């Protein structure tokens, strides 16, 4: 199981099953979290954190989660421990006997610090847990104009698995993880001026060189050299998105934070 396979599975399901942009954004966010937890079969995520990162209400999160489960893309089980929120898995069905860790709250320093999940151990009835299955999202603070624009879903210039996988890998690097959607969209728009193969190459260079951007002053010159190597002197309008007279089909989704 890896991000390539999971993204491919989402695209196949989406061909004949309607999924909202919120549900797709949640799926990508869960893939990223599972990756951070080193691809555990069962992992957890706090609903309040998901709501905050994806800028969605708790009700929208629940509906999106249910639609993904109904489509067979994820399995989930709510937890009585508000520090955990909800268990998720891409590969195994979860049942009510999944127990949360008995560690004290002092050991929950961050989301990735929880010990491995222990199956088939009943939670003691006498333990003190919050009655609510999931914590309520914190009040939304006042937003700047930039953050208001961040609620808009991203529009991708290409929708191939190769491009989406390369883009997702870039989004997980330290310098790109906390970028807002408005900044990500600017980079996507710039990549859309090139052929997809060259755009993927720029993304891979950004990952290798730890860049904060994908297009620079000398990129257009590099692109022209790349076109000459690929097509020789018979370019005839090769390059960009107009090489075949059509624009690439964009897909919309909210980026995971």
Image (cartoon, rainbow, N blue to C red):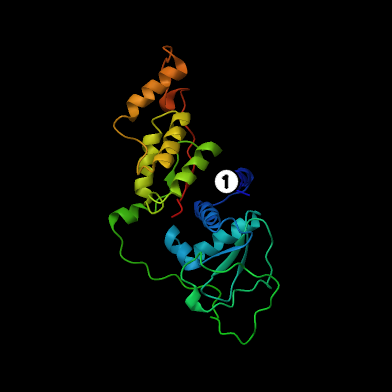
Image coords of residue 5 (percent x, y): 61, 45
Residue shown at the point (64%, 85%) measured from the top left: 125
Residue shown at the point (51%, 54%) measured from the top left: 32
Image coords of residue 167 (percent x, y): 47, 42
Is 236 displayed left or right of 36 in the figure? left
Image coords of residue 114 (percent x, y): 54, 69
Q: Nearer the viewer, residue 108 or 158?
A: 108
Which of the 4 quarters of the picture holds residue 199?
top left
Is 214 displayed left or right of 40 in the figure? left
Q: Which quarter of the rendered picture does the C terminus lie within?
A: bottom left
Q: Residue furthest top?
A: 233
Answer above or below: position of 134 versus 243: below
SS at mark 1? Answer: helix
Q: Nearer the viewer, residue 195 or 102?
A: 102
Which of the 4 quarters of the picture holds residue 38?
bottom right
Residue shown at the point (47%, 38%) measured from the top left: 250
Answer above or below: position of 43 versus 201: below
Which of the 4 quarters of the picture holds residue 100?
bottom right
The residue to which callout 1 is attached is 7
Q: Residue furthest right?
A: 120
């Amino acid at each position: 199981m890896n991000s390539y396979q999971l993204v491919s599975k989402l695209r196949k399901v989406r061909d004949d099953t309607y999924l909202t942009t919120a549900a797709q954004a949640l799926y990508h966010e869960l893939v990223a979290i599972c990756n951070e937890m080193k691809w555990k079969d069962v992992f957890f995520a706090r609903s309040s954190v998901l709501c905050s990162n994806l800028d969605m209400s708790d009700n929208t999160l629940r509906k999106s989660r249910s639609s993904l489960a109904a489509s067979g893309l994820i399995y989930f089980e709510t937890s009585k421990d508000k520090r955990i929120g909800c268990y998720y898995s891409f590969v195994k069905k979860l049942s009510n006997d999944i127990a949360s860790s008995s560690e004290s709250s002092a050991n929950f320093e961050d989301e990735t610090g929880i010990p491995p999940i222990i199956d088939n151990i009943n939670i003691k009835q006498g333990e003190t847990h919050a009655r609510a299955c999931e914590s309520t999202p914190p009040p939304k603070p006042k937003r700047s104009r930039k953050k208001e624009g961040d609620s808009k879903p991203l529009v991708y210039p290409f929708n191939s698995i190769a491009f989406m996988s390369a883009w997702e890998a870039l989004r997980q690097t330290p310098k790109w993880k906390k970028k807002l959607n408005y900044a990500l969209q600017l980079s996507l728009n710039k990549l859309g001026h090139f052929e997809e193969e060259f755009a993927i190459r720029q993304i891979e260079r950004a990952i290798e060189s730890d860049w904060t951007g994908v297009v620079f002053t000398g990129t257009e010159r590099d692109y022209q050299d790349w076109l000459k190597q690929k097509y020789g002197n018979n370019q005839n309008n090769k390059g960009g998105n107009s090489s075949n007279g059509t624009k690439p089909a964009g897909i919309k989704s909210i980026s995971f934070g």
